[in-house]
Image (cartoon, helix red, strand yellow):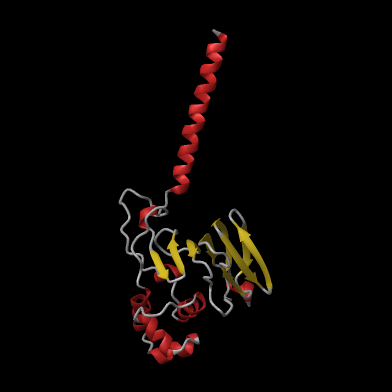
Amino acid sequence: MKLLLRAFSIENRRRHLAFFANFCTGLHMTTPTPAPDTPIGSTFRRQRHEKGLSLQELARESGVSVGMISQIERDIANPSMRVLTALRRALNMPMQEMFSDTAESSTEDPPFLRRAEKRPHIDLGPLQKELLTSGGNHHLQMMILTLAPEGSSGNTALSYPAEKGGLVLEGELTLHVNGQSATLKEGDSFVFDSSLDHGFRNESDAPARILWVIGAVQFDRHL
């Protein structure tokens, strides 16, 4: 009898372990379907018009050429993160605005929540962004970056007052900060001062997914 009970107990544990393994595998394999891609051109054009700026004036303020701004506004260019950041800062435009977040949240959801299926999505060719932060203006922005093989933040270093951090969810990411470089793999995390020259590239042959966090900092820290 004891042997039968022991055998039953072992088999029962095996079934539970198998069920748990399948459950975890399902969680890992399931990726929420993001909201449709956001056309960023119309967003920048609207912001420029609201600020009363001509293409030439915005080019002067941002350091981005008139031709590039025109192509971005017509959604026929894949601008780098440096170019988008320069335009966004010249227009004094919050990061949230760039996603043109029009997804309606459930009336039952509190304002701090964003459902997985309601994530605004921007397709920049080799770089894609999914916004995780809930609606409204926040000092903290969270997103998931998907970076194709050889995709990067651009050929010119980024630099502006903020703090950035993140976690590599899948694949590999080579991160450059203030003249130093490191290759991060799945599970590796990072934090750095965004006022330092920085950039990133996926030097592997597989896509990378990164949880990317940007936190606003007090202006007097960078005076």
Res 129 → quadrant:
bottom left
Residue at figure coordinates x 59%, y 78% from the top left: 157
Up/down of 30 relative to 145, above or below: above
Side of 61 relative to 155 (left or right):
left
**Where's residue 143, x and y in %?**
47, 61
Residue at figure coordinates x 52%, y 61% from the top left: 206
Q: Residue furthest bottom?
A: 56
For the image, the number of numbered tags is 0
Res 196 → quadrant:
bottom right
Residue at figure coordinates x 32%, y 60% from the top left: 103
**Where's residue 169, x and y in %?**
54, 55
**Where's residue 216, x and y in %?**
54, 67
Q: Nearer the viewer, residue 79 or 44?
A: 79
Name the image quarter holding the N terminus: top right
Q: Nearer the viewer, residue 187 or 178?
A: 187
Up/down of 8 relative to 159, above or below: above
Residue at figure coordinates x 56%, y 58% from the top left: 168
Name the image quarter holding the C terminus: bottom right
Q: Nearer the viewer, residue 5 or 54?
A: 5
Q: Residue furthest front?
A: 205
Q: Residue furthest top?
A: 1
**Where's residue 133, x and y in %?**
44, 59
